[in-house]
Image (cartoon, rainbow, N blue to C red):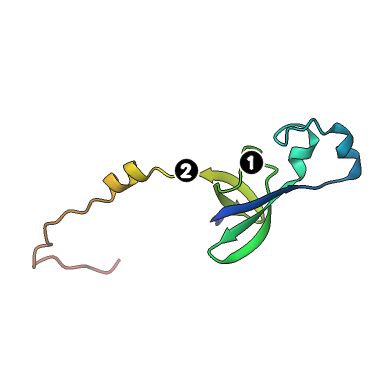
């Protein structure tokens, strides 16, 4: 089983071998430089450097899922849909309801 942790991108840097500078087109999302992009990501107060090689579309402020130091996907905020799904049933449970162990 794998575990991915959500975090917020604070800063993005592109640093790699000197030879990749010759291929830099100015667009940080394409070309060899996109493989060397990394970000400082905040995990609730703990900041770590994370590779953005698998997520070239990531921007500062984006929330990402990180596994083993690599950002794997963006976390999209669907607040309106999420809030509608979180509405709870206001009816109390019947007093005869019991929980049985598994």
User: Which residue is label 2 attached to?
Assistant: 76
Using residue 29 as the reference point, say whether residue 82 is left or right of it. Answer: left
Name the residue rendered at 28%, 51% in the picture.
86
Q: Position of residue 49 (x, y in %)?
A: 69, 57
Are the two marked residues, 2 and 1, in contact with CB atoms closer than 8 angstroms?
no
Q: How many numbered callouts?
A: 2
Q: Position of residue 29 (x, y in %)?
A: 70, 35
The quadrant of the rendering that contains the C terminus is bottom left
In the depicted structure, whether residue 36 falls above or below residue 66: above
Using residue 68 as the reference point, say whether residue 14 is left or right of it. Answer: right
Q: How far apart are labels 2 and 1 at the CA level? A: 14 Å
Name the residue rendered at 90%, 43% in the picture.
18
Q: Please tell me in which quadrant of the rendered image residue 32 appears.
A: top right
Helix, strand or loop under label 2? loop
In the depicted structure, whether residue 31 falls above or below residue 96: above
Name the residue rendered at 17%, 53% in the picture.
89
Using residue 8 as the reference point, say whether residue 25 is left or right of it. Answer: right
Q: Position of residue 26 (x, y in %)?
A: 77, 33
Q: Please tell me in which quadrant of the rendered image residue 73 appears.
A: top right
Using residue 99 as the reference point, say whether residue 41 is left or right of it. Answer: right
Q: Earlier in the sequence, mark 2 or mark 1?
A: 1
Camera-nearest residue between 81 and 100: 81
Helix, strand or loop under label 1? loop
How many residues crowd mark 2 within 10 Å: few (<14), some (14–19), many (20+)? few
In the depicted structure, whether residue 28 falls above or below residue 92: above
Q: Which mark is residue 55?
A: 1
Residue found farthest to the left: 95
Camera-nearest residue between 72 and 80: 80
Name the residue rendered at 80%, 47% in the picture.
15
The quadrant of the rendering that contains the N terminus is bottom right
Q: Position of residue 10 (x, y in %)?
A: 61, 54
């Amino acid at each position: 089983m794998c575990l991915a942790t959500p975090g917020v991108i604070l800063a993005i840097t592109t640093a790699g071998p000197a030879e990749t500078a010759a291929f830099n087109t100015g667009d940080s999302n394409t070309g060899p430089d996109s493989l060397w992009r990394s970000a400082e990501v905040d995990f609730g107060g703990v900041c770590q450097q994370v590779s953005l090689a698998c997520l070239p579309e990531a921007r500062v402020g984006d929330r990402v899922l990180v596994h083993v130091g690599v950002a794997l996907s963006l976390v999209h905020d669907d607040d309106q849909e999420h809030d509608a799904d979180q509405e709870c049933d206001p009816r109390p449970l019947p007093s005869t309801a019991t929980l049985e162990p598994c």
